[in-house]
Amino acid sequence: MLSLSDARVVDLSIPVEPGVASEPWPAAIESFDHEAGAELLAENLRGLGVADVTAEDFPEGMGLAWEEIEAITHTGTHLDAPYHYGPTVGEDPARTIEAVPIEWCCGDAVVLDFTWKTPGTEITPAELDRQLDELDHSLSAGEIVLVQTGADELWGEPAYLTDFPGMGAAATEHLVEQGVRVIGTDAYGFDKPFGEMGRRYAESGDPGELWPAHFAGREVEYCQIEKMANLDALPRRTDVPLVTTPVAIEGASAGWVRPVALFEGDG
């Protein structure tokens, strides 16, 4: 049995970071240091009727530090709920993030290597099966699939938004039909890059070119983790014990998450 006191932990996340070039809608973070915290806490106490409290009354004139964050739920590493893709899955209401079963987000993962694939191209069912064959691995219900593109190495650069392959509708459905509920990627998005989808749509006029992997979630129920990192740091490709539970936000389409993989000793 794995003991947490002896476990090796691999962090598979990127941070919520202000002003970064690899976020189209970056977070805005206002930080309050300990001196500002003393002023604000004293103001709060005065509002409660403790009229003579000032910042200087706190030990060394310092209160508590904190931050105020303005960010979309899809900033940083996050897990998309089925509601992100549409209001329904088939004929059923789509789950929002607080309704996603915790059991879906904890389990063994398999990492599929697509670092060889050309950025902007679409991952197919046959390519998924080929990667599984190379690992001599068959998927089981409840297993988590992680798609490694290597794009996390570009974090902080504009190229992070453009230089990665993406999943397609058929590939997404192919995994979900085998009992996979959660699929992750170390790229900015689960689908192909925005510009590539737009180019294909402009060329063909086919609306199926727009976010096809996401919109597959209107037919099959699944969640996706976007903006993972450090998949190359995992000591093995299969049977990766993963915990990736999202922050529960009432009625939301996604929740921030810090996925961690746990291994015995050196893994």
Image: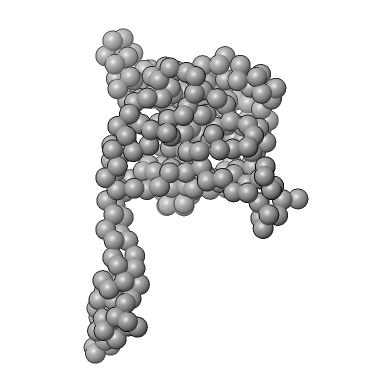
Q: Where does residue 38 sit, x and y in percent of width and height?
A: 29, 76
Q: Is residue 12 visible?
A: yes
Identity of the residue furthest to the top in this view:
204
* Closest to the observer, 175 or 185: 185
Q: What residue sits 67% from the left and 36% below the top? A: 239
* Closest to the observer, 229 or 127: 229
Q: Where does residue 74 sit, x and y in percent of width and height?
A: 37, 42
Left or right of 11, for residue 210:
left
Q: Where does residue 206 sit, x and y in percent of width and height?
A: 33, 13
Rendered view: 249 above or below 79: below
Rendered view: 222 above or below 196: below
Q: Where does residue 186 sit, x and y in percent of width and height?
A: 46, 33
Q: How is the image coloured?
A: one colour
Q: What residue sits 47% from the left and 38% below the top? A: 228
Identity of the residue furthest to the bottom in this view:
52
Q: What residue sits 55% from the left and 16% below the top? A: 127
User: In the rendered image, which quarter contains the C terminus?
Assistant: top right
Left or right of 172, for residue 154:
left
Q: What residue sits 68% from the left and 30% below the top? A: 140
Identity of the residue furthest to the front in this view:
266
Left or right of 96, for residue 262:
right
* Closest to the observer, 204 or 7: 7
Find residue 207 and report its image quarter. Answer: top left
Q: Is residue 89 visible?
A: no
